[in-house]
Amino acid sequence: MPKAKVNNIEIEYETIGNPSSKPLILIAGLGGQLLAWSDEMCEIFANSGFFVIRFDNRDVGLSTKFEDAGIPNFVEISAAHARGEIPEVPYTLEDMADDAIGVLDALKIDKTHVCGASMGGMIAQILAYRHLSRVLTLTVIMSTTGNPELPQAKPEIMAQFFAPVPSEREAYIEEMVKRDSLSHGTFTYDEKQSRDYRTKEYDRSYYPDGIARQLAAMAVPGNIKPKISAIKAPTLVIHGSEDPFNSIEAGKEIATVIPGAELLILDGMGHSFPREIIPHIVNALVTNSNKISN
């Protein structure tokens, strides 16, 4: 796969579909490699008229790792917030948004449709207000503004998801398959699909340290609610009714603050992409993309 040289690092990316089709860049969530956007989903997007771009965010997958930065001190990050200060972190979500722009530059794409999920949805929002002229439309899935006043995830859920993960291959895969079962909503859990995905993920690049640094990046800018009203692109917000991490209120807030944004609540959807909901996401994104002429 090719790499884009941007911000003094390398970002691994892949394209699917016809380069003459309308471009769509997909931004993955916390710790997610480009594999988080499944081959099946990308092919459906491509068959729907998009030139699909998926990539590894910095510090995961095959993109540049920030090993020298070490593991962030989350106690100090929280203390800095309490003091009203900007915490020191290895990099920020703004840096990660600029990485996506670098991928577009490498492909010589001036304007694109943008779609991000979870943390990737935060990056997508930041990209949309930092780089207004580069965004045709914006789709934000199961994400948030980071507003601390929003309902928070249940502590027991967070404890399960952020508990230490075994490093040994089979133990890691089994643990992640178990955790995936907690976020799929009311749809039938496809354990085989999860195991296949987690196996590919581990074999391609097992690197948990990057997840910690990405988590720290979410502390800066923290709450982006005051900034997203500047977004001009036609925006679609997709959220699951059963999301255990980002409540429906998080999706509603994004749709309320971004001018003209539409909100699609998918009943039964949690914080994942079960096969049943993929056609709904694709159809909604296609409809949103048709609001503008490329």
Image (spheres, rainbow, N blue to C red):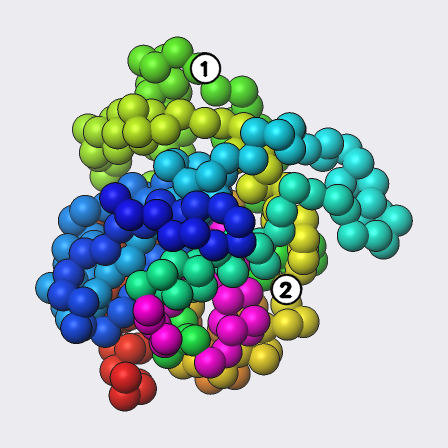
Disc 1 + disc 2, Cβ < 8 Å:
no
Q: Position of residue 251 (x, y in %)?
A: 49, 63
Q: Is residue 119 highlighted in magenta?
A: yes
The amino acid marked with disc number 2 is Ile
Q: Residue at x 44, y 60 (%)?
A: 102
Is 283 left or right of 127, judged from the image as shown? left
From the image, which quarter does the N terminus lie in?
top left
Q: Residue at x 29, y 48 (%)?
A: 2
- Please tell me whether residue 173 is drawn above or below residue 32 in the rendered image: above
Note whether residue 166 is visible: yes
Is 93 left or right of 289, judged from the image as shown? right
- Please tell me whether residue 161 is drawn above or below residue 88 in the rendered image: above
Q: Is residue 257 highlighted in magenta?
A: no
Q: Position of residue 19 (x, y in %)?
A: 18, 67
Q: Nearer the viewer, residue 256 or 241?
A: 256
- Please tell me whether residue 271 is drawn above or below residue 202 in the rendered image: below
The amino acid marked with disc number 1 is Pro
Q: Nearer the viewer, residue 8 or 174?
A: 8
Q: Residue at x 31, y 63 (%)?
A: 107
From the image, which quarter does the C terminus lie in?
bottom left
Q: Residue furthest right?
A: 83
Q: Position of residue 181 (x, y in %)?
A: 34, 32
Q: Residue at x 67, y 53 (%)?
A: 220
Which region of the structure is painted magenta?
108-133
